[in-house]
Image (cartoon, rainbow, N blue to C red):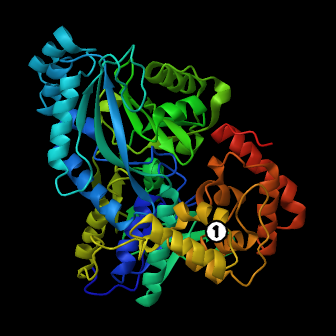
Amino acid sequence: MSTGQTANPVLILGGGIHGAAVARELALNGIPIVLVDSNDLATGATSKSSRLIHGGLRYLEYGDVSLVRESLVERRRLLELAPHLVQPLRLTVPSNAQWSGLVRSGLGFFKLARTRLGRWLISRSERRAPRGYWLIRIGLWIYDLLSWGDRLPKSSGFHAVEGSEPIPAINRSRYRWTCEYSDAQMQYPERCVIELLMEANEAAKKNQKSIQIIPYAKIEWQGSKVRITAGQLDTDFFQPEIVINVSGAWGDLTLNGIDAGTTPLFAGTKGSHLVTRHPVLKQRLRKQGVYAETGDRRLAFVLPFADGILIGTTDERWTGRPEEAVASDEEIVYLLQVVKDVFGIELQRSDVESHYSGVRPLPRTTDASSAAISRDHSIAEHRLHGVTVMTLVGGKLTTFRSVAEQIANRVFRRLNVPRTTSTVDRVLIGSCNFPKDLDEQQRHWDRWTRDYQSTTDEIHFLWPLYGMRTGEILRTVATERADTVSDTPITRRVVEWVIENEWVTTLDDLIERRLMLVFSPNLTTGTLRDLAQSFITKGRLEESEIEATIDETKKRLSHHYGRTLP
């Protein structure tokens, strides 16, 4: 064990939200780190999530009160510390019954559902009972109590009578009661990953500690020593001080790479989502979200998402490799039926602009129901070839900071070093000096447009991705030519800055996880061609490779996102 200082780095396996948050915790506290991912940063559950920052209302049905409380505390923190990425969201929960579901959910809350008596009561009366209005109201009263200290509006109830209409405008022939409550949304968790790693990078330089962030890495183990290759990089074998496995649904595969005899820890489920811009659905949603029970007693949602709508999610057992998960025809039909049931609108397949699917890193369990598997997390520790390996099992987007804090505290104890910097009240870099109101925000936009030869459209595009860093980026590239990328408001000079500074390796990285153009309705082949030219300018691509690169990106967009570009 080290005493006070360590020359060897901590090796972080996984570049998703938890890997990035752990890197930030350690770098801020002067620990040298190497973070690697076998793919790009944020390619797993981070970029395939439901994009909600929430306490987990349905977790109360399984008595996970501590998880809900932790999540609500972190929700409040993110609203305060990352307002450029996280915004409040009001959600509606519709119901077609009043008292139904109380017995089943009460047994679940008090953890009696798996007892002999509990199973008998459920089978006798409420095996398929829908969640009634009063069950939802009781759950929301508990939710309000657990969220004390935040400034969000509390829950409310609504009974549809003649001449009244709930907001959003749901199907009144199906639902007579609705409840409303507050949660939050992070539209682009991919951008949060990059910000966390940016801060880790800056902190390491300030503390004069080494840091390497290596996507698309290949790892070779030789006992407790590791060798990393990626592109032109080829390290010597080195001994990591500690290994932190935060590779999500790839967790067992990662452990097998270190020691093939490791006991499996994960049993993931696949969740798929649809994106649409259906005008009638947008009008009925009215910029709020809906969280509704489906015919098979699952809970699905319909949410505002940028200038579109996000519909999700499914919960299917998954045994294949996580990167192979795509939305199936059955899942798409299922989610379209959710919209029909909740809003009375029959969407067609042609109304689906894109879809995506990911695998949740859930713990291996004997639960027959995927919904019943806890969304809480645990940290498993092994000694493999003489080195300590910490593996994160489970974890949610909402609690990424607190989970990373817990992992980092274990590292500090192992290394016998004190924590010198806390992230509890640390603002993310894109929210430093964030505007207090829209007028102040507009003043910043006007000044950047004037001083850095940008446009309102470009700033409007960059703002949800970068927040206050938008001005810093535009200032850095202000003296360069401001040619615009086809069918976008972004300039080539900004694209080239992103390629140079945000660990971009491929065209897919840029579209899917940096500029978020994968969800732009205006994405075209011309956009891809201009972006590819920026790779050439930065020496990352040869002219002769452009057509093959564009073809591969279009194939990936078609297969994984259901998008065919004009």
- Locate residue 321, reporting x and y percent: 54, 42
8 relative position to 514: left or right:
left
Please tell me in which quadrant of the rendered image residue 99 appears.
top left
> The C terminus appears in which quarter of the rendering?
top right
Query: Number of callouts in the render?
Result: 1
> The N terminus appears in which quarter of the rendering?
bottom left
Residue appearing at x 41%, y 77% in the figure = 433
Pointer 1: residues within 10 angstroms few (<14), some, or many (20+)? some
Q: In the displayed structure, would residue 231 be above or below residue 52? A: below
343 relative position to 539: left or right:
left
* Residue behind mark 1: 230
Q: In the displayed structure, would residue 192 be above or below residue 565? A: below
Kindly state the secondary structure of the residue where label 1 is placed. Answer: strand
Q: Is residue 220 visible to the viewer in this orientation of the structure? A: no
Residue type for callout 1: Ala
Please tell me in which quadrant of the rendered image residue 28 appears.
bottom left
Query: As rendered, which of 393 and 195 lies closer to the eye?
Result: 195
